[in-house]
Image (cartoon, rainbow, N blue to C red):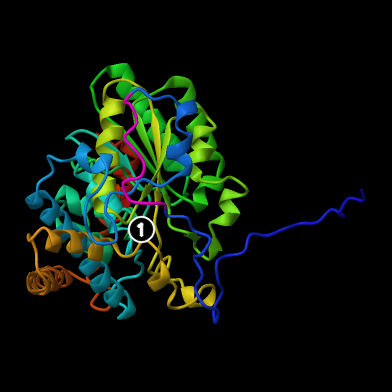
Amino acid sequence: MKKNAPALTFPKPPARPNESPDFSSVDVGVAGELGVPPIDIVAADCRPYANGLIRVLNDEGHAVGPWADFIDDVDLEFLTQGLRDMMTIRTLDQRMLNAQRQGKTSFYVQCTGEEAIGCAFQRQLQPGDMNFPTYRQQSLLIAAGYSMELLMGQLYSNELDPMQGRQLPVMHSSRKDGFFSISGNLGTQYIQAVGWAMANALTDDGKITAGWIGDGATASNDFHSALLCASVYQPPIVLNIVNNQWAISTYTGVASGKSRTYAARARGYGIPSLRVDGNDYLAVCAVSRWALTRVRQGYGPVAIEWFTYRTAPHSTSDDPSAYRPRDEAKAWPLGDPIDRLKQHLIVNEAWSEERHVQTQAQLLDEITTTQKAVEAHGTLVDNKPLSPALMFNEVFAEMPEHLRRQRQESGF
């Protein structure tokens, strides 16, 4: 038999601009189909969980299956708070996008469509646990109760900025809230997270580390180094992979190659792995609780692929209409995380369309009020420069003599 001539291929997205969105190849499975694995499961037995999709909410808004039973103690008040968390971050996203377009701030990254992942995961963490996030996990901060004033202060780079201008606007940091300083070199945080987890194991402090990475950055060396180290040393870490289908303008297939899922890739390193509907708040709650319990009990690392869709542009510097259909988000088969949790609460008579509208208006008023107060301290339009003396502060515990001289020579 004559062989075909060698050729190169390049993964194609579901559709390009001016084409109809097409997710017909995406198999979302059936809600409630996959069971809850034993807490001590090994990677070899994780194949159905790594290749399938764990879902709790069905199309009618009902929580079904074993994973729903796993979190049957989660009450409607808890879920209502989760809905408010997601609505808060979406409202903030829109306000900050508008501020950037008005020239008031330089840069912003939205997490629209991915709110359930960070909001639900954070609610399962304990004080002292540490996230190593990317720049699209501000939902972790919102669910942790981080100060909206400080968050906006950094976005405007004014005197309320807790980083005092030492980080890009979207690269937050809060040890108290378990949010490690974001690195702009994507992928580096993954191996750092494994190192932090190893330190936790050595000090026996009982704390858990959560590493975060996007699908595009899984093509980096640090991703593979992190998985190898986690596999070898078995530290207490949850390795989160947010597959939102797009790495800037590059379709996820370029990073995944011929691997069926990112969870399967992690499983190849001998790490138990699960793949989860990232737009299902209850599924995120359930799997996060299971994973954190497993890791906290000393069974080693676990990887989770959160299957979702980036609705918004990659950043305020991006125009997604150049590489995908404008209405593609509406065709995403797993829907919108806010709408799905809202429907579940309405079905259970804990919410209503009227209350939803009222809550949206209330959150918009609260965030707008805070925004105006923060903008009074300075924006790019109404600039109120910080003192250059700040660059010398909080670098060393005790300022060395050469920096003291430089500060004096600079007149500060």
Q: Secondary structure at mark 1?
A: loop
Q: Residue at x 25, y 54 (%)?
A: 139
Please state the horizontal and vertical placement of residue 306, each as a whole percent of the image: 38, 49
Question: Which portion, as a residue range, is magenta?
Answer: 29-39
Is 167 left or right of 375, judged from the image as shown?
right
Q: Main secondary structure of the magenta part?
A: loop
Residue 36: say if magenta.
yes
Residue 253: say if magenta.
no
Report which residue position mark 1 lands on: 168
Please state the horizontal and vertical placement of residue 397, each as a whole percent of the image: 25, 34
Is 355 left or right of 259, judged from the image as shown?
left
Is 276 left or right of 161, judged from the image as shown?
right
One can see residue 411 in this view: no
Q: Residue furthest right?
A: 2
Above or below, 271 against 165 in this view is above
Q: Residue at x 30, y 51 (%)?
A: 117
